[in-house]
Amino acid sequence: MSNDHHHDHDHDHDHDHSHLSEMDARVRALESLLAEKGYIDPAALNEIVEIYETRIGPQNGASVIAKAWVDEGFNTWLMEDATAAIHSLGFTSRQGEHMVAVANTEHTHHMVVCTLCSCYPWSVLGLPPTWYKSPPYRSRAVIDPRGVLADFGLVLPDDVAVEVHDSTAETRYLVVPKRPDGTQGWDEKQLARLVTRNAMIGTGLALNPADLT
C-alpha cells in the first residue's frame, strides 16, 4: 500500500477563513435585500451560478485537457510550463497566478485543495464550487484524501498513491486526468465533452464514452 503525499505551500492569507469574508457577507446581505424587494429570484440566481460553476466555466479547462490528450507536443509544454501553454489558447487570468499541471497515471492520482481559503484557477475552471471553499473539504483533503475521494464516489486501488496539492495566491493547479479508453480517433471537441470540472480538481475522473449517451 502506497503512502499518500501532501505538497505544502505558503499562503499570503493570515486571517480566519472559516467564516465568510467581509465581501462574501456583503454580497449575501445584498442578495437577501434584493430578494426581499422582489428584484431577483434566488432560485434563478442559483441556477445561473450553477451553470457557470459546472458547465460554462470548466469548458476552458476541458479544451486544455483535450488538446493535451491529442497533441503530444502541447502535452509536454503543458507539463513543463502550464502557464504559457494555457495562455497560448487564450485563457488568461487577471490574477496573474502561476499554473502547474499534474497528470494522473496508473500509479498516482492528484487532487487539489486550498487549505487556508479558496485559491482556484478561475481562468480554466470558472467559479469555484461551494464544497471546494468549505472548511470540511479544506481540512479533510489533507488529513484523509482517500476518504474525501470516497465521498465523491471515487475509490482508488491501494497501490495508487494520492498526492494532494495545496493551491496558493501565486500558484494554482490543474489536474490532467487519464484519457478514457475507447476514444481513439476522437477529435478535441469530442474529447472535451468527457472532461469534467471534478476531474480537473482531482475529485473525479474523466467520463467514459458510454457516459455521454
Image (spheres, grey):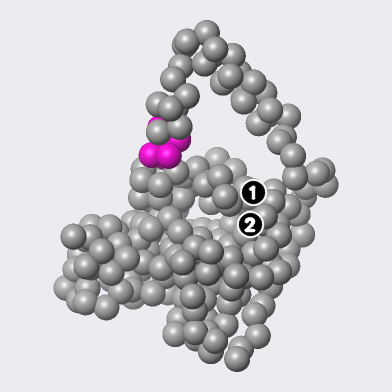
Q: Residues within 10 Å of mark 1 (few under 14, many from 20)?
A: some
Q: Tell me if residue 194 comes above or below residue 120 in the rendering.
A: below
Which residue has dot 2 on it?
137
- The quarter of the image holding the C terminus is bottom left
Asked whether residue 200 is in view, the answer is no
In the image, 132 versus 195, the foreground residue is 132
Quadrant in which residue 180 is drawn: bottom left
Q: Residue at x 36, y 66 (%)?
A: 206
Give the percent coordinates (x, y) of residue 169. Answer: 67, 50
Q: Tell me if residue 130 comes above or below residue 166 in the rendering.
A: above
In the image, 80 versus 12, the foreground residue is 12
Residue 51 in magenta stretch: yes
Q: Does 109 sit left or right of 166 as displayed?
A: left
Residue extent of the magenta highlight: 48-52
Q: In terms of secondary structure, where does tag 1 sit?
A: loop
Q: Residue at x 64, y 21 (%)?
A: 29
Residue type at mark 2 is Tyr
Q: Does 72 sit left or right of 102 as displayed?
A: left
Q: Residue at x 49, y 84 (%)?
A: 157
Give the percent coordinates (x, y) of residue 154. Answer: 47, 70
Q: Tell me if residue 137 comes above or below residue 45 in the rendering.
A: below
Mark 2 touching mark 1, by CB under 8 A?
Answer: yes
Which residue has dot 1 on it?
134
Q: How far separated are the C-alphas under marks 2 and 1? A: 6 Å
In the image, 31 versus 100, the foreground residue is 31
Q: Does 95 sit left or right of 198 as displayed?
A: right
